[in-house]
Amino acid sequence: MDFDMLGLAPRLVKKLSEQGITDPTPIQTQAIPHAMNGRDVMGLAQTGTGKTAAFGLPMIDALLKAGVKPEPKTARGLILAPTRELAKQIADNLSAYTQGTHLKVALVVGGVGIVGQSKRLQKGVDLLVATPGRLIDLMDRKAISLHETIYLVLDEADQMLDMGFIHALRQIALLLAEDRQTMMFSATMPKLMNELAQTYLKNPVRVQVNPPGQAATKIKQSVHYVAQASKMDLLLELLDSHRDDLALVFGRTKHGCEKMARVISSKGFAVDSIHGNKSQGQRDRAIQAFKDGKVKILVATDVAARGIDIPGVMWVYNFDLPNVAENYVHRIGRTARAGAGGTAVALCAPDEMIELQDIERAMKEEIPTASGRRWEVQPGQKKRPNGRTGKGRGRPNGGKPSGNKPQARGSKSGKPNEGGKPRRPRRRGKKPSKT
């Protein structure tokens, strides 16, 4: 089957062909016809299988056929994504699909100036890609109204739940047009996703390419059982065996990743890092250098697990195993993109065995052993706190103090504050006299 058999407008099919996109992926073949019939869709597919086109092409097709210009400060379609990197990736893809048409695509995310984003929304846009926090900021400023929004997409909805965006979703959904089409896509299906679907989708069609939580079949997985203090030496040895290949290394914390990048750089590797303490400009430049091959190794927190679509990534290393099992699938999904192959390597210390067991349970398979012997889970052993470091945990130097300053605190709402600023230190002593 090709795209014109799915019922898409000929000029849209021609635009896809010009970009070398001729054969729809399984998730696109299943989702596009239902979406074009106006049905709400819940799509489950692994990362790298073309979910953006699965929800983007039906919306673009409908907007082209309608020929209606958006009202000032409104958006006809809204796509919500949990991270800036993923939002930018979606916006770039939609812009490519709509090139040469009258449709306008806008991106609004945190970490960059809000004034410029407000100005871009003044004349209205057809498709708005946004992270929830920045969208609410713009709504509070009366820069955007959603009463004309008739298409809503929740991409990587499970991570929105993990990152505490449920309250933001409720706030946004109340302001959308009541008669709308809603689509929700993800690679995993935690229990709360069903509740989310029941709340925001009306009689949805469920399309599923692979069982939720499973990794792509072309990813070769393995795990090394290694002491925390020996992880850095092993990682350097493994990276040295493929210096010309692009490799992603996932760490647990912002400061741990930054230190890891410095150690890797000291061994002569071209490396950069992205995490919440980096500005959006720094993160964009690091990803672009990685895409261009100027940087061969990118060290990242989970902020990048769903926002990097680079077909050339051959290796993914889990230096620290994620606390949330589903995040492992998204991390290793950065390789084997668009049907290519790739390798995912995990380094498992003794206090990470519970995390490893959770990952294997979620994927319904045991990860093959590359070296070492499987650790025994000790009586009373608990999961490591998410995103925090303890003695010997999540640090590339085996747990020695790094000398870095404490991390910035999260927001008052309790949501993760990737990129938040540290609070000002309190002044001590008496307040100055008013006289």
Image (cartoon, rainbow, N blue to C red):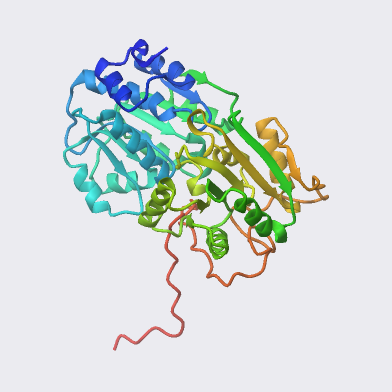
Q: Is residue 289 above or below residue 166?
A: below
* In-image side of 167 versus 91 (left or right): right
Q: Is residue 318 above or below residue 147?
A: below
Determine whether, in the image, residue 75 is placed left or right of residue 38.
Answer: left
Pinpoint residue 180: horizontal percent, then vertical percent.
33, 23
**Of the pair 400 and 100, the residue shown nearer to us:** 100
Q: Looking at the picture, tell me which residue is in the foreground, 281 or 201.
A: 281
Q: Is residue 34 above or below residue 362?
A: above
Residue that appears at 44% across and 67% down: 423
Q: Looking at the picture, how far across and down is residue 94, in whole percent?
A: 32, 32
Residue placed farthest to the bottom in the image? 435
- Rendered-image quadrant of the N terminus: top left
Q: Nearer the viewer, residue 434 or 70?
A: 70
**Percent position of residue 70, x then y:** 19, 30
Query: Going 63% across and 56% down the picture, which residue do you hit?
Result: 236
Q: Is residue 366 visible?
A: yes
Q: Is residue 179 visible?
A: no
In the displayed structure image, the side of residue 178 where residue 371 appears, left or right: right
Residue at image position (60%, 39%) is 343
Image quadrant where residue 190 sits: top right
**Quarter where residue 105 is shown:** top left
Disc count in the image?
A: 0
Give percent across and percent down for residue 321.
64, 48
Position of 5 with respect to 148 (left or right) is: right
User: In which quadrant is the C terminus drawn?
Assistant: bottom left
